């Protein structure tokens, strides 16, 4: 028999949907002791909360997150709200002894992130941050190949996250739909939104970053603000580039933007090692490109691996070889691993501390861009 | 409020899983009046039926499909069993007034298929066959582009479905797991299993086929049979190739095999029209390749369309541009369309009659291969 | 010191250019005892012959090929004229004791081809046919991989040659520029022009073909004829499809057309063996796709081999790894091999007899399409 | 009649071969008033000079470049020697009134480059630098598309040049074959060798660069030196990354390395504009990827343009649509344009001054990497 795990979700937007879907489906595909129960969803608008609850089968709704956090029948608080609310909610939830799953980036900055880490570590509550791309099977396979030592010494790690949805200068900023364009709500622009993903993956795959040198740009300087109705200065970064050095001696080359026409969600990374290289691309997330120099010369080439076989990470739980999965499955995998972590006592990563380390890289990037100089990343 | 639609599923294998997942998913992503309820699952093994019911939340189990068909609390019978059982179950279900969703191919042959068509048409019960690939968004988009007349006169339609999972001669035939290799259960080999998909799509996209000329091959002539334990003659076709002519004058070139090393589920089609061509590939099912000769010459090229925008078929119901969906979503779409059809009175296709027409092409192919001559496809 | 080999070229069109370029190039990149000398070019129009000679440095011109064939200072006759002239010229050249290089297809049909074979074999003159694609390095590498036994038993060989340049019904037929559309000059349409290439490669890579079953189509039934100025019936095949069986038991699936919008010269082949598969595509001729099932499962995938390393066939003679060569290099390689054959006494292939065997397959295809039945290929 | 242009080539290495091939072939494919004559080749080793002359048909050899420069019968000096010799030779050749074609990078640094510019400008001799990639047809087409305004405002320009041939630490440095690894001969490592190409193209396509921020790395710190036989410190950069800003406001992201396993000569660039984006890759140099946001939404995608049609730059001079050309053709095109420039009086670019501007960017990169700060690029 499975044990129920009562979920209280805060936020009903894109991530509320992605997480709810993961909770609803994980037990169909993974054998687990725990079973998430969609207990309550919280949103300031009662109507929207009710509609979301009806759609996804949440048993109850709340309109004040404090109430949700206080409910005795909730085991886990899932934070799907804008970045500027993460800390307050998470710290309250930790004090209430709840498990916490928090959307990324963890916090508005490292200092805030540290307070969150301290809160969950003091409360000893399971905690995890939704850097979901670690659990795309091709990405997990990358980790496995690196851990097996197949790449040898690493020389280069480069990552990009390119989008094109904010090129139109008529697009407003702020409000429920566009809080990511509002510095007050989001903290930063592509740095916290997109680079954060690239950095989480990089730290996981290639270890910590020693120092960075960054530049940012805001191409559209003013946009109408949805909350005030006025044209206001844009406070976020539209694009961010940084170079740097990992502690293992490899060079970092990262870039993110929302002004790359033709790319919707082009998160790519490439790792060049002494013996082998790996490339991955979110637009074809079910494939991994692998080059192994130890292959015989005349038949050496980049291998396009269709990551859909039963011995590929997570894939034995889904369909049959050749049949691909999609974006949302990364969330299902993350929930599965979290629940497995509760069973085994080996927590699934990234936890708040891991995400705090990513936050410190983000801080260094923003400081470097501001001060136009190399910045050493603080150790977390 | 949604209306419950009580589902009785027969079979717990790969397709039982794919369909159950679709029923469980569909209302989260599509606004529909009906809501499937997983009422009962039927399997000869009570243990297996119970385990499947527990996993997917079926309320009850049956071990005799006749019982399931007779239950008053079942609205819809979903047939996920080997091909040689479809007709008997479907005809009984029709007589019992149930809606019927049947796995493909509809029947063992055209004659059997016709009896099934007559049964559902006489009973006036909603019916549909699981040719799921029509609802891969890129394939649905192809239909839309053709219907808009973008391709002009069609010259060529070619399709392949290539796999490689039966190359090992030690693989046995028959039994629960390998009934597809047993002619008694499957009727034919790749013709009914793989070409059937290609033909369903082709008839939908390009209209009916006039005549065919086919060859089949069985590369491994004998395999151990799981039911008898003895090495027995293999009765199925391992590979099938046919050429032919559509009624619209275009040429058909089709091939399927389970002996194409390196391809797991490489269903591809390409259509060449006067003005434009289209190519699709199941291994990257979220992309469509489109060439439009009317583009200006110097920038003319095959367009790789990432079918994930909100205005692409079905995609507005899922995530955001750039985030791909997977194989199982085609089943969700098919259930959504079936339920929508119940609402609107415009039945979702392909129904049994459509699938019977596909069966007639399969019959012609097998006859042509046997008799080594051109065969005109019977009209259904 | 190199020995001069005096070339007399008949025809100044596309192939005259491709061959002349090969003669002019070959000694720069290959160490050879022989050096082609562009001695004379022959064309009915003296002006055109002179212009071509000036461009390419031919020492002399002729307007009657009989004169050219009779010249004592010519060692080798290169036939670059329409198909219906090959036999007469070649037989005369053989009688005159000249080496002969003949454009493909060898002849208008097998019977004519046989007379040509008999002529060169009787005269014991070196002879070769310009099936140049054997010498694209990726294709030569394919031969090498097959000869090493890497593929194991072959199950499937499929090839296509797709073009789109005759879709416009206003395009006339016949005359100097468009003789390929005139059955009297070309013998057949895509069968002799495009399938001939596919068959030559296939016989080389996969051995002889036992039997074929073909269909052809002429989509545009009438076109203005350039020689008569009248609208006349089109006698060539616009498209041809055939299936068949190789003597090694593998299945053949071939197609060619000039009505595949979006493809300019898409010659592709794929070979599926027990252990490995290979795919090649003329549109990216410097790459070979190779899948080896013996690779470890989790990193198994199609390898995209950039055939530009020094240990790839012919490539050590050109640039450095990563720098690709183009179409015309296949002709340079063929000349290099022909000259090397003169040195070593091991003639370069395909000779007239090889090309005659291809002709017999073409005959069988056309007969099968005409008579709508399976045809056994005659042995050559 | 064509006018002879007498060429004196200094150096017989890879570039000597590429240039000689271009001179030998240009008149076969381009209608030009001038015809290059391979008059003399110069190398310190008389044997090597003679062998090269015999291979390529040079009429004479020299072993002292001063002699070559002084010869009256030479119109043009082509400098194919290591970087540290360019300035002295070029300045002497300018004084002798010769036309000069110089391999890239122009000089060891900007100051040296300026002296060379002053010399040729004072002497008023035609001059050009072999940044050949401008004349890959896909790259030339990019320039055309940008000049037509198709991209709109440019937001991003990123380029990479990745190789993997120096990963082995046993590879020595210096001497004839490996002078590129010797700082004394090469000036810098990948910066001058690879980034120089990227920068030349970028300045041409996207205008001048305002400021850069760079890092370099030498992964293998010591290598045996071929000239001394001793293990010596490696003075060149193995990898270089820089970010920066163009004067048009777009962001620059550049990287080059010889430590990217799996890439032989992966020069790529991508340009993201308001309306359209372009991507090119030297490994498939005959293709251009083009995305135009103004395409209708449902059929919008990256177009893979096979740059082989007659209306594509330079391609009307070669074969027919679908047949690709290779690396060496870029040199043929550059010679063709140079000769055309002599005819028309509109000099082909890049000339020494253009290449000097590239040199100033290289200087800024190296300074930035050394001083770990942003550097403004000097105006040239």
Image: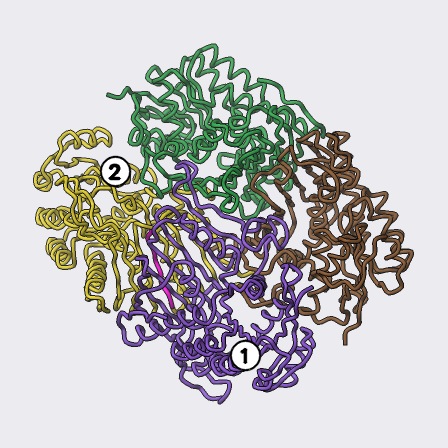
Chain colours: A green, B yellow, C purple, D brown
Q: Which residue is mark 2?
A: B17
- Residue C315, horizontal then vertical, whole percent: 58, 53
- Residue A84, horizontal then vertical, whole percent: 53, 25
Decide which of A321, B30 is in the foreground and name it.
A321
Residue B76 is at least partly visible in this image: no
Quadrant hosting residue D252: top right
Q: Chain of mark 1?
A: C
- Using the numbered discs, state the Cα–Cα distance from disc 2 to disc 1 in whole angstroms: 74 Å
Give left or right: position of A201 versus B12: right
Q: Are marks 2 and 1 on the same chain?
A: no
Decide which of C190, A324 is in the foreground and name it.
C190
Which residue: 32% across, 75% down?
A: C367
Quadrant hosting residue B152: bottom left
The region drawn magenta spans B155-162
Callout 2: SS: helix
Give left or right: position of A231 versus A48: right
Taking the magenta stretch, the answer to whether it contains residue B219 is no
């Amino acid at each position: 028999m499975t044990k129920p795990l009562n979920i209280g979700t805060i936020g009903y937007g894109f991530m509320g949907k992605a997480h709810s879907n993961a909770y609803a489906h994980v037990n169909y595909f993974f054998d687990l002791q725990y079973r998430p129960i969609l207990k309550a969803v919280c949103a300031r608008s009662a109507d929207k909360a009710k509609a979301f609850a009806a759609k996804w089968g949440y048993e109850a709704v709340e309109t004040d997150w404090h109430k949700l956090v206080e409910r005795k029948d909730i085991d886990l608080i899932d934070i799907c709200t804008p970045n500027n609310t993460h800390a307050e909610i998470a710290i309250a939830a930790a004090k209430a002894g709840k498990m916490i799953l928090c959307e990324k980036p963890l916090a508005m900055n490292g200092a805030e992130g540290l307070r969150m880490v301290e809160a969950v570590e003091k409360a000893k509550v399971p905690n995890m941050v939704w850097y979901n791309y670690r659990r795309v099977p091709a990405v997990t396979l990358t980790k496995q190949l690196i851990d097996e030592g197949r790449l040898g010494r690493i020389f280069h790690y480069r990552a990009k996250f390119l989008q094109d949805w904010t090129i139109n200068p008529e697009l407003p900023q702020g409000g429920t739909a566009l809080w990511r364009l509002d510095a007050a709500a989001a903290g930063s622009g592509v740095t916290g939104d997109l680079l954060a993903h690239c950095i989480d993956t990089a730290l996981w795959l290639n270890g910590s970053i020693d120092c960075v040198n960054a530049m940012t740009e805001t191409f559209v300087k003013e946009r109408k603000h949805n909350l005030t109705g006025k044209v206001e200065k844009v406070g976020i970064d539209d694009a961010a580039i940084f170079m740097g050095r990992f502690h293992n001696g490899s060079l970092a080359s990262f870039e993110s933007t929302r002004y790359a026409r033709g790319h919707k969600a082009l998160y790519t990374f490439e790792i060049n090692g002494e013996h082998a290289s790996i490339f991955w691309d979110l637009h074809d997330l079910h494939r991994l490109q692998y080059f192994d120099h130890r292959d015989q010369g005349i038949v050496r080439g980049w291998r396009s691996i269709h990551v859909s076989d039963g011995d590929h990470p997570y894939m034995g739980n889904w369909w049959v070889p050749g049949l691909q999965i999609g974006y949302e499955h990364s969330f299902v995998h993350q929930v599965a691993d979290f629940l497995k972590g509760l069973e085994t006592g080996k927590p699934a990563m990234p936890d708040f501390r891991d995400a705090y380390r990513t936050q410190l890289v983000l801080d260094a990037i923003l400081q470097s861009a501001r001060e136009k100089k190399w910045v050493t990343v603080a150790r977390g």
